Image (cartoon, helix red, strand yellow):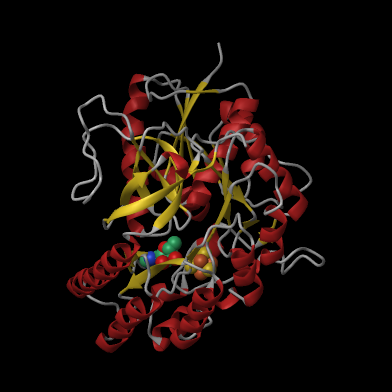
Amino acid sequence: MSKKFKIFTYGCQMNRYDTETITGYLEAEGYEETESNESADLILLNTCSIRDKAEQKVYSQIGRLDKLKKTNPALKVGVCGCFATRDGEAIAKRGKAVDLVFGTQNIAKLPMLLEEMEERRVVDTEPIAPDFTELAPMVRGGGLNAFVSIARGCDNFCTFCVVPYTRGPEWSKPSELIVDEVERAVEEGFREVTLLGQNVNSYGRKSPGELTFGGLMRRLNDVNGLERIRFMTSHPKDCDEDMVDAMGESPKVCEHLHLPVQSGADAVLARMERGYTAEEYLEKVSLFRERVKDGVLTSDVIIGFPGERDEDFERTLRVLREARYDNIYMFKYSPRPGTPAFDMEDTLPEEVLTERFEEASRVQREMTESLHAELVGGVQEVMVEGAVKPRSAPAGCAGCPDFADESDSNWFAGRSRGNHRVQLYAEGFTPEPGDVVEVKIMRGGIHSLAGVSPPSAVVMEEGE
Ligand code: 5AD
Ligand code: SF4
């Protein structure tokens, strides 16, 4: 009987991609995925280290697995991902249940490590150079969107960030291999890809003769059967005209740019070593607005970096208003051991962090509301993901039909090109997952838009 495994994934999309690769390796070794902890022979925690909270979650989960191991001594427990890379020895010492620790940069060694684990406890976080001669085995998650990593690691060393230490230096995957991977995903039925990298804009810069990121988008725009291309994350200092123009000119590249600003104050940006000023950042935003029609912009913001003064915070609020973000991910600064910012003075008390966090959330909420209200009356192209259950009809959608009764199945959900979640009422037709339909927007809520699709609204049917 084949062995069963279960993986818990924490943190970012890159971790989800790694989980899909690890799943590929495990299935190639004859393991089978299971939903339940009790039936698993191997449980892996794919961890995140970006903020302290993420690490604490892992320790509580290891504690629970310690207990499970008492009832099932044959169970093997593994820890991988960023936290494992950063602190593998400490995790192994603290978590008695842990049999295997491996890093983000040696996943390809997994078949060998699994064998070793049968004999003894294994902690191996030693990076190996990526093998870019062939595609790693992968078992992708469901849905319409396939993650495709285009580069591994990061060379930027922003002073608050652990990623360069946990994921190592930047390596770009050769573009032919990326094209192969995207084509394979399309053959498997995916309609959309999200290109992943810590800094997609510096793609190829260290590989002589390689395409630029703009060139890569143009190349992928030619892949038959692919409907949409998304990407993240962009670094403002490397976001250039080539990339913005490629976005504007490639019909399959969605008009959504995630461009983390982190702070709106030059003094803070300098201490973060981000490599741009607020003014330079806003110039990139203007370039995007100019070249990409109906562009949707999102961002990451860190609140309360050491030494952030009231006036620095005010400057961040100013950028939120000027950049007109559709949405932002906002984080309270979390000191990470081993990073330069960890030793910086003038850390701020929790009350100040909370106060500023709430104020920035308020400002952003108003911005999101006003931008989404502007979309009402317009048309969005939506890729349908599936039906939404009756009774979850959008509240306050003036002009949207109500659910007639519980069997009314004409409400569907999907994503706009700008990555808005959209609920739509299909008038007299039944779209399939993967269909692209036009939706007349009738409500612009803070978390989602809602509207109606007439039968003539089908732009592209799945399989075309
Ligand atoms: N504290 C708070 N937020 C952080 N991020 C990265 N490191 C930290 C930290 N130490 C945020 C940044 C980054 C996002 C992925 O996580 O905003 O863009
Ligand atoms: Fe971290 Fe900066 Fe690299 Fe992003 S660019 S992963 S924030 S070091």
Please say if 64 is above or below 356: above
Indicate the position of residue 36 as horizontal and vertical percent values: 38, 23
Quadrant of the image occupied by residue 190 = top right
Quadrant of the image occupied by residue 266 = bottom left
Q: Is residue 411 left or right of residue 273?
A: left
Indicate the position of residue 146 as horizontal and vertical percent values: 56, 43
Which residue is at 72% across, 41% downward?
135
Q: Give whichever of 264, 96 is nearer the camera.
A: 264
Indicate the position of residue 248 as horizontal and vertical percent values: 59, 67
Instruction: Give the number of marks.
Output: 0
Please say if 297 is above or below 59: below
Which residue is at 41% across, 21% downward?
73
Please say if 34 is above or below 272: above
Q: Quadrant of the N terminus?
A: top right
Q: Quadrant of the C terminus?
A: top right
Which residue is at 59% across, 39% downward?
21
Residue reaching furthest to the right: 209
Q: Is residue 217 visible?
A: yes
Which residue is at 40% across, 83% downward?
268
Residue reaching furthest to the front: 456
Q: Is residue 368 left or right of residue 92?
A: left
Indicate the position of residue 411 as horizontal and vertical percent values: 32, 36
Q: Give whichever of 182, 290 is nearer the camera.
A: 290
Q: Is residue 336 visible?
A: no
